[in-house]
Image: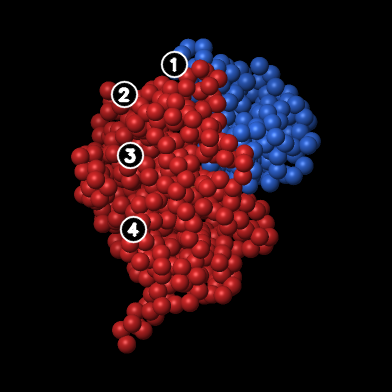
Chain colours: A red, B blue
Amino acid sequence: MGKTLAEKIIGEHTGREVKAGEIVIVPVDVCLTQDGTGPLAIRQLRKLGLEVAKNPKRTVLFIDHAAPSPRKELSNDHILIREFAEKTGACLSDVGEGVCHQIIAESYLKPGDILIGADSHTCTGGALCSFATGMGSTDVGIGIALGKTWLRVPETFKVEITGSFQPGVYPKDLILHLIGLIGADGATYKALEFCGDTVEKMSASGRLTLSNMAVEAGAKVGLFASDNTTKEFLKEHKRTKDFRKIEPDEDAKYERIIKIDASKLLPTISFPHTVDNTKTIDQIRKTIKIDQVFLGTCTNGRLEDLETALKIIKGRKKHPKVRMIIVPASKRVFLDTLNKGYIKAFIQFGAAILAPGCGPCVGVHEGILGDGENCLSTMNRNFKGRMGNTKGFIYLASPATAAVAAITGEISDPREFLVKKNLKERR
Amino acid sequence: MILRGKVWKFGDNISTDLIAPGRLFHLRSNLPELAKHVLEDADPTFAQKVQKGDFVVGRKNFGLGSSREHAPTIIKLAGVSAVLAKSFARIFYRNAINVGLPVLICDTDRINQGDELECDLEKGRINDLTKNITLDFTPLPKAMIKILNDGGLVEHIKKYGDFKID
Ligand code: SF4
């Protein structure tokens, strides 16, 4: 019988065919923890007297959420993580390296891998055709020590996307649209499989944005077949030989098929305080003033995202009442943007550039909102309190919509902006 | 095992940010201290008033968001005997079982704040003693019952040195 990507990848790991609904024990190829979940994973392993890593070269301990550390308790957590890495030989990704999911994609993951990560957005790795899924500290800790985990083979929703985006509309708008459509629990326990000509033409960066947010619809994983784009991405990161082509079978069984016409999509914004509370730009009737713009994270902190924002702000002035915070997702992204001169342009525009990492995303430090403040962010979550203050309001949008808000001081339509700008340039 | 206690009712989409907020990141290595703030951003009085054995009852998609296992851990540490909801987010559900906190999927619409409940985990039955009604809950997958009965995943692995879930 035909298999979905999830059934294929899991089946390869069990050495026999598997069907959705089965519970299986599988070897894991890559494990990750971050500084919010790693210390608990380590303590659980200590309780078991199992302070070991089965595959140290593919076990990665990240320090990215509170990096550099804003307080001594967290500095002590960081010490614990470094000691564990030293003791087990596991890889350490320390302050300044960047966000776990970006680095895992750049340097570790390959098509067909099973990745378990103690971070909910581990599903980002599905963009490279890896069965990448988030779990808690104990599951991942035990995965690190034993080199395996248990899984329920998920049913799959096929998301078929066709047509071209109109200018000013991006993969972020698409994923926000999808989550608005099916709801924050619309795909709970399911795998998403993205396909269609829009996806075939989409860059690896755009695919990473889609997979990243699969969990915001409750999904376990958000998968793409591996193709030339995957190959190019691996080549760019000097890992050509990690490429392998994996596709779902034509007669695979899907629980649901969702079709989206990308040409009909509009810039989309998630309103506080749930990701599925989406509105298209033309549904917004009143002015929404923005106090802080945040461009970055594992969702939209890549070169392509920063490039999109840069094209919009170039030659323009930041609104005097807006703070703009930019956090490149990784050291590599930081260096690329630096070499291209983007960082200088961002600084001249008036943005604050922070070290690669999660930055203000999780409300630990750097950019916590004040009471009643509005933030337009390119991140993936706008839950109450997410940015450190339950009295703050978070709107989610694409890097283009974020850049435009930094200029106008309110939520504005990036399409008009791009069109007007083009006209002006042509004159 | 029969659990008995009072209901603390919450709404839809109780996120892990509401249960164990990011602004308390620095308390994650001090779980008893973090537990004093459990669910604070959803109900600021909950942590002080909850009694041992009480139930947290949500509506749909309980525990969505982050993978932080600290969320179910501090609900358990606060003395809560089980969480009931119409549906749970996947990672929270798995984490709860791993830390030995029963999570029961049932129709929670008729359960209200302050109701007295009795849950029979083996029989899969909930009695709302205040309303005098009986509700059934969806049984957990076998693998999870095994882990829960062993007292969580650490205890399970301690016992068998490996996964023994079938
Ligand atoms: S950038 Fe935000 S969403 Fe991504 S891993 Fe960091 S805290 Fe999580």
Q: Which residue is mark 2?
A: A14
**CA gap, disc 2 to disc 4?**
40 Å
In front here: A347 or A209? A347
Viewed as shown, does residue B80 lie left or right of A408? right
User: How far is mark 2 from mark 1, CA to CA?
Assistant: 16 Å
Q: Earlier in the sequence, mark 2 or mark 4?
A: 2
Estimate how packed mark 3 is, as few (under 14), some (14 to 19) or many (20 or more) residues with alpha carbons within 10 Å.
many
Residue topped by disc 1? B162
Dot 4 amino acid type: Asp
Q: Is residue B11 above or below residue A51?
A: below
Marks 3 and 2 belong to one chain: yes
Q: Which residue is mark 4?
A: A336
Cα distance, mark 3 to mark 2? Answer: 22 Å
Please indicate, yes or no, whether residue B74 appears anywhere in the rendered image. no
**Residue at 35% of width from left, 52% of height from top?**
A332
**Label 3 sits on residue:** A108
